[in-house]
Amino acid sequence: MRKFEFINRIEDENPKEHLFTKIPEFIGDRYHKRRDAGNNVQHRSYFKCTKDDFYTNRQNLIDKGYSVWQENAIGDNLFVTLVNGKYQVHLSYLPHVRQITQTVEEQSTLPIRPEDNVYTDRGFEPTVTQIYSDYSKVDCAMSYAIQLCDGSFVIIDGGWSEFGDPERLLEFMISKLPEGEKPVIAAWILTHHHPDHVNCFKEYAKSYQDKVEVQSIIYNNPALSRVKSNENTVKEFEAIERAVESFPETTKLYNPHIGEVFHIRNARFECYFTQEDLESVHFWNTNNTSIVFKMELGNSKVLWLGDVGSGASDFLINNYFDLLEADVVQIAHHGYGDAPHGLYLYINAKTALWPIPDYRTEIIEKLGGFLKEKCNCEKIYFSHDKTHTIKV
């Protein structure tokens, strides 16, 4: 399965289409509700569970012919991805809420393990760069480029298709490579579907494929059945589908789940949250569909928050507490108030990357003061003044 499908979704009232009928039955009478998680993935949540329930169901899948692809733990939170050649099942156990979640999909691309992460270290210094954004006509945009030891890049979002964002991103990548070398994007991570985050990606799909090589795309978008759909939302989702499908078959598509780890060259990306993890039936605030990753690169840990709001922030705090701590944090939703300030107390980052225009002075003064006074933040880099590169 290569295509991300948001429009042709499987509904609850068609039980014959349930992927859960294709895998071993969950052991324990705690079924909550099945729902479509988007991207041809289905999801169930089970409550009042224990760690023993997690391991019992893990072993049950192994006994029925599944093998463990990847296991991980973030504190006491447990995660495992299992495969049998036809289906892949992801289990997570969150002890704070005594919940096990189970996702099932047809087997496709899987998290990148260390043994599958083959590359040549060319001696490039690992860096994180916040690309300058032109806020003269818009008040939001987000674009980051992470250079890895082999010279390739991981792109986080990218910004708009307008206002010079695609050109600036390309110029930056070219400037960091030997003359004449074509930029390689080892992974393009799209945090969520909003145009100030993904339109640059769509422009690259349309007009830049001869200028860069995109090796993989990492994205987890909700089904339209879970968002407050309108004509614009449908068009945005369809445009992302078309962009993804325009890349060659050699470009791998990854649909991350909570707790999964992606080893990309000398960087390690650990997934802390996706839209699958909120139990609400509908997303009235689609900022909460953002993927949250913690990246380990060089000597630093960077927490990428996308545009998460209060619901996703509560999930992060309740399940991770001080495990959220990082050296660098990307300020959520441009600092526009959706994420509670208390989230940053747990992150406790000394450096903040803040994609916000300079004319949002009240927000900058309020949240900026909180970061410095309460969260031990020593340096804040803004995307409105220039492109900033930090060594990690």
Image (cartoon, helix red, strand yellow):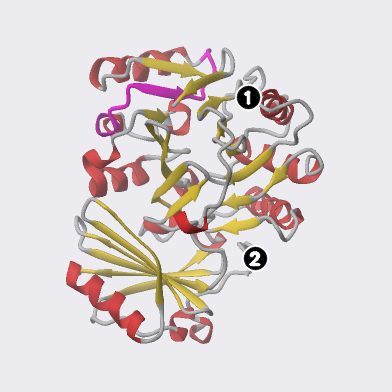
Amino acid residing under circle 2: Arg
Q: Is residue 75 above or below residue 326?
A: below
Q: Is residue 165 left or right of residue 313?
A: right
Can you tell which mark lies on residue 89? none
At 31% from the left and 45% from the top, the residue drawn is 316
Q: Residue at x 24, y 77 (%)?
A: 56
Residue 74 appears at what percent x and percent y? Answer: 28, 51
Q: Quadrant of the C terminus?
A: top left
**Which residue lies at the image location 38% right of the left edge and 13% below the top edge?**
365
Write down the region rendered in magenta.
345-359
Percent coordinates x, y for residue 144 in the rendering: 56, 31
Q: Quadrant of residue 345?
A: top left
Residue that mark 1 sits on:
138
Name the residue beneath numbered marker 2.
2
Quick check: is 346 in the magenta stretch?
yes
Residue 183 versus residue 50 in the image, above or below: above
Q: How many marks?
A: 2
Q: Amino acid at mark 1?
A: Val
Residue at the image point whose x is 58% and y is 24% from the top: 139
Secondary element at tag 2: loop
